[in-house]
Amino acid sequence: MTSAHTTPVPAEPGPPAGRADIRITAASPETARRVAEVLRRCFDSTEQRSYPAGREGGTRLHLTVDTTRPAEPARSWLATSRSVAADDPQDDEA
């Protein structure tokens, strides 16, 4: 009897320090682009890449933002959220 050997799939490398990879899934490309536009107003970002989201249609949009160079309103939000985020882990971070 031959045993099956599976090779683990390597994890996708994370973004460099100070950057965040963002994946947006929306029913339409226009909706995904609107969300990405808001993020680009707050942070420097890479060019967005879009992909089909599934059989039902929809769009998946990927971009990377640079959190070390935030613009308003993200700059003020980041400044006020840092002390709170360090004290209380979010429910979905467990």
Image (tube, helix red, strand yellow):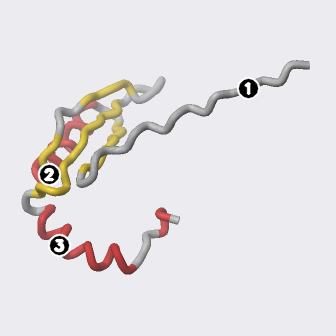
**Residue hosting label 3:** 79
Callout 1 amino acid: His
**Residue hosting label 2:** 43
Q: Residue at x 29, y 28 (%)?
A: 50
Callout 3 amino acid: Ala
Distance from disc 2 to disc 3, alpha carbons, whole Å, reads 14 Å
Please determine whether, in this image, residue 45 is positioned above or below residue 29. Answer: below
Q: Indicate which disc, 2 or 3, sits on the residue closer to the N terminus.
A: 2
Callout 2 amino acid: Phe
Snapshot quadrant of residue 76: bottom left
Q: Quadrant of the N terminus?
A: top right
**Residue hosting label 1:** 5
> Percent from the top left, x then y, of residue 45?
16, 43
Depth check: give the residue in front, 77 or 7: 7
Q: Residue at x 86, y 19 (%)?
A: 2
Discs 1, 2 touching: Cβ within 8 Å: no
Q: Indicate which disc, 3 or 1, sits on the residue closer to the N terminus.
A: 1
- Other-residue count near label 1 (Cα within 10 Å), few / some / many at <14 / 14–19 / ≥20: few
